[in-house]
């Protein structure tokens, strides 16, 4: 595949700022977005920069919480961690290069076409994987709540890990046509970023929208509709269990467990609503504007909404789910402890200074020598309790004794 071909195509296009169809020829490759569209570009940069920072921190918190907090280590939450990983690819790789594209324009990628291809590939695969993980979460919750007898069979640890890996393989397979001539990659002048070429082959664009956006939406809708019907049907049962005077521990535990899972389902339903709000405008614009006549500002708004989805999911977990909130707190405290362990303790310097002062004493200062020796003994006792952080070992104190 000719990597330079995408820039030959870009040179024939316009960013269509005013909604017209003027052709800017080769000058398109040397556009300075910050000069030509200052208000739009600086606003886009500001919002994207903030969302990039928030998204990176939030998605790392989600992954770390699922891995470190035992109550969150469930097969269902593996899909949430996989979703956070896909979102992290967007916020840590795609969004920073989008900022580079706005600041430097297409010319930055003219000598680095392979880099543009890689970024575009990661963009499409990670965004698609994010959408399909949301669908996988919805299906997982449906099976757990509505078909509990099938859950231990379908969602073992090994099978769930295989499902997560399969989602990535399918999403990268959806990217393959862009490398074989059916679709393509380009620097999109309207979104100011490297992405798949939505105009190279409109049939591929429609296929991507159907497989990557529409199918996950249908899966989410059907799954949560069934969960909603199930929740209404079981609400009376939960009330009956609550009102029973002969309530036994097993039923109480069952009720508590079901309520927790329904709460998580409600949280994930809100995640899906945000997903619909963020991605539906982009899919609508791409499908309807097949001849590329809509203005640049429309594309900037819809692509920003789509990428915002990767930065806000962790906030919903924090606001709506107590288990995730505790997981965030524990993961943050562990990071804090690691940072403290990396810092040198203050008494290290004190002990070393004391050793120097001890070596400067002469043998005639027997009283001072005894006092100094006792002080060193106290430091040694303290260091035994925390030898890893103090950096003073038993051998180092033997060295001090030999000096006398």
Image (spheres, rainbow, N blue to C red):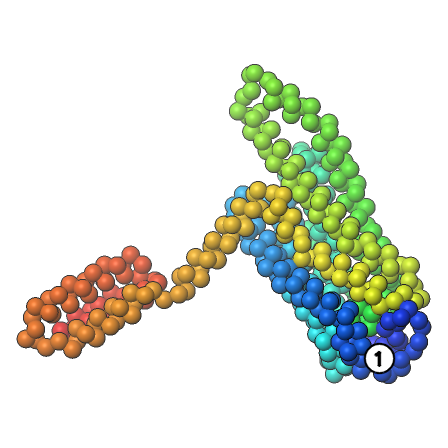
Task: State the residue at coordinates (57%, 55%).
Answer: 61
Number of on-image labels: 1
Q: Which of 71 and 169 is in front in this view?
A: 71
User: Can you identify the residue that label 1 sits on?
Assistant: 28
Write the residue at 5% across / 75% down: 364
Residue 253's place in the image compared with 26, above or below, is above
x 73%, y 67%: residue: 43
Question: Residue 15: x and y, percent?
Answer: 86, 73
Task: State whether residue 222 is above or below residue 89.
Answer: above
Q: Is residue 138 shown left or right of residue 381?
A: right
- Decide if residue 211 is on the left or right side of residue 319: right
343 sits left or right of 193 in the view: left
> What is the quadrant of residue 102 in the picture?
bottom right
Above or below, 20 against 273 in this view is below
User: Which residue shows up at 79% across the image and 43% down it?
Assistant: 221
Q: Residue furthest top?
A: 245
Residue 269 vs residue 402: left or right?
A: right
């Amino acid at each position: 595949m000719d990597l330079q071909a995408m820039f030959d195509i870009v040179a024939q296009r316009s960013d269509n700022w005013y909604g017209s169809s003027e052709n800017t020829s080769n000058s398109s490759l040397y556009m300075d977005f910050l000069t030509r569209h200052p208000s739009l570009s600086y606003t886009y940069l500001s919002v994207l920069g903030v969302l990039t920072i928030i998204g990176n921190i939030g998605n790392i918190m989600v992954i770390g919480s699922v891995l470190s907090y035992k109550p969150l280590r469930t097969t269902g939450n593996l899909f949430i961690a996989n979703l956070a990983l896909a979102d992290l690819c967007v916020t840590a790789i795609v969004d920073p290069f989008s900022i580079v594209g706005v600041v430097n324009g297409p010319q930055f990628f003219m000598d680095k076409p392979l880099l543009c291809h890689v970024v575009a590939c990661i963009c499409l695969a990670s965004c698609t994987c994010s959408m399909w993980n949301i669908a996988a979460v919805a299906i997982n919750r449906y099976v757990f709540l509505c078909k509990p007898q099938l859950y231990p069979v379908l969602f073992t640890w090994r099978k769930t890990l295989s499902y997560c890996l399969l989602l990535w393989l399918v999403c990268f397979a959806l990217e393959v046509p862009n490398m074989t001539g059916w679709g393509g990659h380009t620097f999109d002048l309207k979104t100011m970023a490297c992405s798949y070429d939505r105009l190279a082959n409109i049939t591929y664009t429609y296929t991507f929208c159907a497989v990557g956006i529409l199918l996950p939406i249908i899966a989410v809708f059907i799954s949560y509709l069934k969960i909603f019907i199930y929740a209404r049907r079981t609400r009376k049962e939960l009330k009956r269990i609550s009102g029973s005077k002969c309530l036994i521990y097993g039923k109480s535990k069952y009720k508590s467990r079901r309520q927790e899972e329904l709460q998580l389902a409600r949280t994930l339903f809100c995640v899906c609503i945000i997903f619909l709000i963020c991605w539906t405008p982009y899919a609508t614009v791409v499908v309807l504007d097949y001849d590329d006549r809509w203005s640049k500002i429309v594309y900037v708004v819809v692509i920003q909404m789509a990428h915002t989805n990767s930065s806000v999911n962790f906030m919903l977990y924090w606001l709506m789910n107590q288990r995730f909130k505790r997981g965030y707190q524990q993961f943050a405290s562990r990071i804090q402890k690691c940072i403290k362990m990396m810092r040198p303790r203050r008494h290290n310097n004190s002990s070393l200074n004391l050793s120097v002062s001890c070596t400067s004493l002469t043998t005639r200062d027997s009283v001072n020598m005894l006092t100094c020796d006792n002080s060193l003994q106290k430091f040694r006792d303290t260091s035994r309790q925390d030898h890893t952080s103090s950096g003073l070992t038993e051998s180092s104190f033997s060295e001090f004794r030999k000096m006398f």
